[in-house]
Amino acid sequence: MARKYIDCREFPSDMRCTVAISADSDDELIEAAIQHAVSVHGEHDTPEFRAEIQKAIHEGTPPPTVA
């Protein structure tokens, strides 16, 4: 099973968040990313937001910088 990640640096933000979250499963990764987005960025946990998070999942590990 390949490691997966979501990188906050890919999302425009005044905060310039540099957090990257990784996990072995989509479900675990989405739950962690939602918790981060709600508690740190003030997002709302909605089905639409979960779908957006799902699209941001990458295989592997986060790169040192984001283009």
Image (cartoon, rainbow, N blue to C red):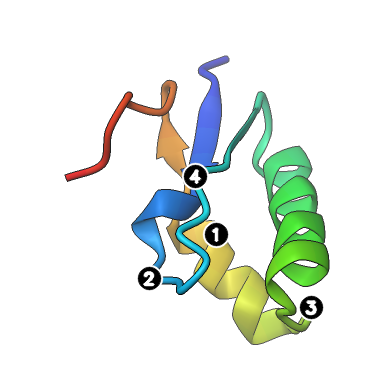
Name the disc covering residue 41, or none.
Answer: none
Q: Which residue is denoted by mark 3 in the rendering?
A: 45
Residue contact between numbered discs 3 and 2, judged by CB atoms under 8 Å: no
Label 3's element?
Answer: loop
Cα separation between marks 2 and 4 = 11 Å
Residue contact between numbered discs 2 and 4, judged by CB atoms under 8 Å: no
Q: Position of residue 55 (x, y in %)?
A: 45, 61
- Residue at (32, 24) in percent of width and height: 64
- Please name which of the two marks, 4 or 3, marks the residue nearer to the observer: 4
Cα separation between marks 2 and 1 = 17 Å
Label 1's element?
Answer: helix
Q: Which residue is denoted by mark 2 in the rendering?
A: 12
Q: Which residue is denoted by mark 4 in the rendering?
A: 18
Sequence-wise, the earlier of marks 4 and 1 is 4
Sequence-wise, the earlier of marks 3 and 2 is 2
Sequence-wise, the earlier of marks 2 and 1 is 2
Q: Position of residue 19 (x, y in %)?
A: 57, 42
Amino acid type, mark 3:
Asp
Residue contact between numbered discs 4 and 3, judged by CB atoms under 8 Å: no
Check the picture and name the quadrant holding the C terminus. Answer: top left
Is residue 8 depicted above or below 11 in this figure? above
Q: Which residue is denoted by mark 1 in the rendering?
A: 54
- Please name which of the two marks, 3 or 1, marks the residue nearer to the observer: 3
Sequence-wise, the earlier of marks 4 and 3 is 4
Sequence-wise, the earlier of marks 3 and 1 is 3
Check the picture and name the quadrant holding the N terminus. Answer: top right
Amino acid type, mark 1:
Gln
Cα separation between marks 4 and 3 = 21 Å
Please give the count of numbered marks on the rendered protein. Answer: 4
Q: Is residue 36 left or right of residue 66?
A: right
Q: Residue furthest left?
A: 67
